[in-house]
């Protein structure tokens, strides 16, 4: 794993020994950030199920203002801190060790970008609760984007009355969705993303 672009380009990212992680392949990560374009620069970012911090660190390297990482395993969370130090981005980030969805209370939004990259084998009720809490707690800015990666075999898809699908990309072993909060009646949204 490595940082693909930006100030930390080429820096290797390491995980905790003995942890079986499912890293985002470089080609998938490059495509994800290609979709987001200039929406990353200056954004406040939340990286959920953060693993080694690959997505949040990539965002920071590409000019995001700040990133909060939430990871439940202490050893893996330590690897995020190590990777932030290695990339010289620790001053723009915080790492919280807690379980989701309840641990979402630790998030200090609103955020312009939220990455949701859960284990492929996860209870869909947990994801349903997480997506609901993100909206209920106002964690995503009105024109913010949520990027969600899941398995093509068992992916949770949030209800369309609450989330608008902006983009979907299939990559064989994973699917990437980009969502925004659904516009409610009489509510104006910001400029469409590009």
Image (cartoon, helix red, strand yellow):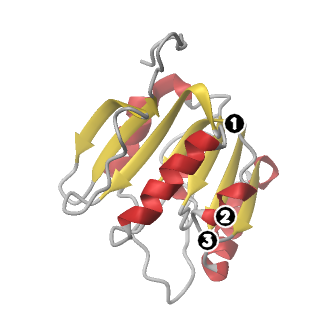
Closer to the camera in the image, 121 or 113: 121
Residue at the disc numbered 1: 110
| Label 1 – label 2 distance at C-alpha | 16 Å
Closer to the camera in the image, 137 or 111: 137
Sequence order check, earlier mark of 3 and 1: 3
Residue at the disc numbered 2: 103
Question: What kind of element bears circle 1?
Answer: loop
Closer to the camera in the image, 51 or 104: 104
Give the image quarter of residue 75: bottom right
Residue at the disc numbered 3: 99
Residue extending furthest toward the bottom: 18
Residue 16, position as x, y percentages in the image = 57, 81
Residue at point 55% right, 71% down? 14
Give the image quarter of residue 134: top right
| Label 3 – label 2 distance at C-alpha | 5 Å
Left or right: residue 191 versus residue 34 is right
> Compared to 150, does 109 lie above or below?
above
Q: How many tags in the picture?
A: 3
> Compared to 5, does 73 lie above or below?
below
Q: Are marks 3 and 2 in contact (CB under 8 Å)?
A: yes
Q: Say few, some or many: other residues with alpha carbon within 10 Å of mark 1 (under 14 / 14 to 19 / 20 or more).
A: some
Residue at point 58% right, 53% down? 47
Residue at point 46% right, 20% down? 183
Q: Say few, some or many: other residues with alpha carbon within 10 Å of mark 3 (under 14 / 14 to 19 / 20 or more).
A: some
Q: Are marks 3 and 1 in contact (CB under 8 Å)?
A: no
Q: Specify whether residue 85 is in view.
A: no
Residue 74, position as x, y percentages in the image = 67, 80
């Amino acid at each position: 794993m490595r940082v693909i672009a930006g100030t930390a380009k080429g820096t290797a990212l390491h995980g905790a020994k003995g942890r079986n992680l499912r890293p985002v392949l470089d080609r998938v990560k490059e495509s994800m950030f290609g979709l987001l374009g200039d929406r990353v620069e200056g954004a406040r970012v939340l990286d959920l199920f953060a693993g080694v911090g690959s997505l949040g660190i990539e965002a920071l390297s590409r000019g995001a203002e700040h990133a909060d990482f939430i990871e439940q395993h202490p050893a893996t969370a330590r690897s995020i801190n190590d990777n932030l130090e290695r990339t010289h981005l620790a001053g723009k980030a915080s790492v919280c060790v807690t379980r989701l969805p309840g641990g979402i209370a630790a998030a200090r939004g609103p955020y312009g970008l939220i990455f949701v990259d859960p284990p492929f084998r996860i209870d869909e009720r947990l994801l349903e609760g997480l997506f609901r809490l993100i909206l209920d707690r106002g964690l995503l800015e009105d024109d913010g984007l949520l990027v969600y990666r899941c398995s093509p075999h068992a992916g949770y898809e949030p209800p369309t009355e609450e989330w608008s699908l902006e983009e979907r990309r299939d990559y064989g072993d994973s699917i990437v969705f980009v969502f925004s909060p659904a516009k409610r009646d009489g509510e104006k949204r910001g400029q469409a993303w590009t």
